[in-house]
Amino acid sequence: MLGNFSYSNPTKLYFGEDSLNYLNEELPKYGKNVQLAYGGGSIKKNGIYDKVMEILKANGKNVFEDGGVMPNPTVEKLYEGVEIAREHKVDFILAVGGGSVCDYAKAVSISVHCEEDPWDKYYLRMEDVDNEIIPVGCVLTMVGTGSEMNGGSVITNHETKLKIGHVFGENVFPKFSILNPTFTFTLPKYQMTAGFFDIMSHILEQYFSGEDDSTSDYIMEGLLKSLIHSSRIAIKNPADYEARSNIMWIATWALNTFVAKGKTTDWEVHMIGQSIGAYTNATHGMTLSAVSLPYYRFLMPYGLQKFKRYAVNVWDVNPDGKTDEQIAEEGLFCMESYMKELGLVMNIRELGVTEEMLSGIADGTFVMEGGYKVLTHDDIVTILRKSM
Ligand code: NZQ
Ligand code: ZN
């Protein structure tokens, strides 16, 4: 049964090859002092930095640079960004990069006027934001996280080995996001495919919950089919605009809260993946690919009918003459073949996980209650061991 919900999404999107021009329409809405957050330098190599700078200058902005946002942004970097914002009385933060830069910009935006330690308040204690928030805009260069149209912000604390995502409310969503598929063409293959699987995982985390006749599940099956189709094209020809633009659009819809409405949702693959990330600093999408099949094979008996539906509706498995288990297993086998075709990381050893880390990773994994089974510590260790 469709649960009760409210729905709105405040992020305005500009999509397409000319979308960066719309920065000219958005910038005048905000104050003069702009913090420009970006990563380790890809935007300087591919020319996006120059294009954005030109528009910022043309709009008379004082630009305060905040580069070096690392993949899986750290709590130390967050404190550094907060200092930049405070020192220059920043009115607006423009994130130019992938999910890490966008998540980081949101973290800075809520922390500048926070009187307590933001890591403690917003990530460890998961409190709602009750202080002033600096508005954020995003120019996306890496597809996968959905951070461009959601309130998610994931920060890593290497000292305590915790990687925590807080899903903030609408007031923290980017005010606008600029989605130009051509900006993603320079992504290395490893990042591109990690992003593809991140999208798939976001959809599956929401799909594998409930056994009702939810419209969201039909929408997700469509998104999955389009993703599988377009990613197969993109892997052969990364400059295929149609495929890359479809994938960019799917990524946004996979995690902008829409398909989650009315569902309990799971998110356990992400919780395990995040804990692996805290131990290894591995690429987010690859932490998910490495644990997904062991997790879903473990989960299958608890949600058999949904796994059967997944096999038939997403992977076109012919159900004739087969048991429910056989159909469901064939679906996961098709998923495995597809993942190998994409060249995804299929085990956590490759990400640097060692036997000694397994119990600690399980300890650092948040246990969610919306999926088909509430995992115990031992369950998580079993899944991790199968992922080695
Ligand atoms: O730092 P630069 O030099 O820019 O290089 C980046 C980085 O090394 C590179 N890159 C990005 N755009 C590029 C490019 N290289 C060439 N050309 C381009 N156009 O790609 C690398 C990875 O970037 P990153 O932003 O780290 O990737 P992603 O978008 O996957 O973000 C990962 C972070 O987002 C969090 C993850 O946990 C992780 O911390 N997530 C955020 C979510 C949310 N907000 O809702 C949900 C997700 O499940 C996820 O947890
Ligand atoms: Zn993800």
Image (tube, rainbow, N blue to C red):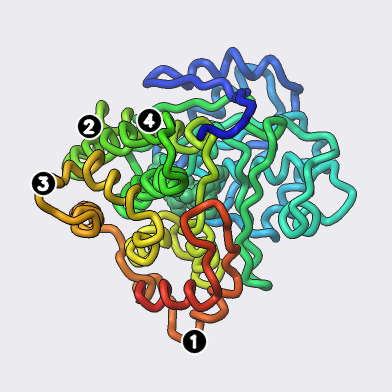
The x and y percentages for residue 123 are 72, 55
Q: Nearer the viewer, mark 1 or mark 4?
A: 4
The reply, left or right, for residue 175 in relation to residue 199 is: right
CB-based contact (under 8 Å), mark 1 and mark 3: no
Residue plotted at (62% across, 31% down): 4
Q: Nearer the viewer, mark 2 or mark 1?
A: 1
The x and y percentages for residue 370 are 54, 51
Q: Which residue is mark 2?
A: 240
- Looking at this view, is 233 or 91 the one in front? 233
The x and y percentages for residue 38 are 56, 43
Disc 1 secondary structure class? helix
Three-letter amino acid code of the residue under disc 3: Asp
Residue plotted at (22% across, 32% down): 240
* Sequence order check, earlier mark of 2 and 1: 2
- Give the number of the disc on residue 320: 3
Three-letter amino acid code of the residue under disc 2: Asp
Three-letter amino acid code of the residue under disc 4: Ile
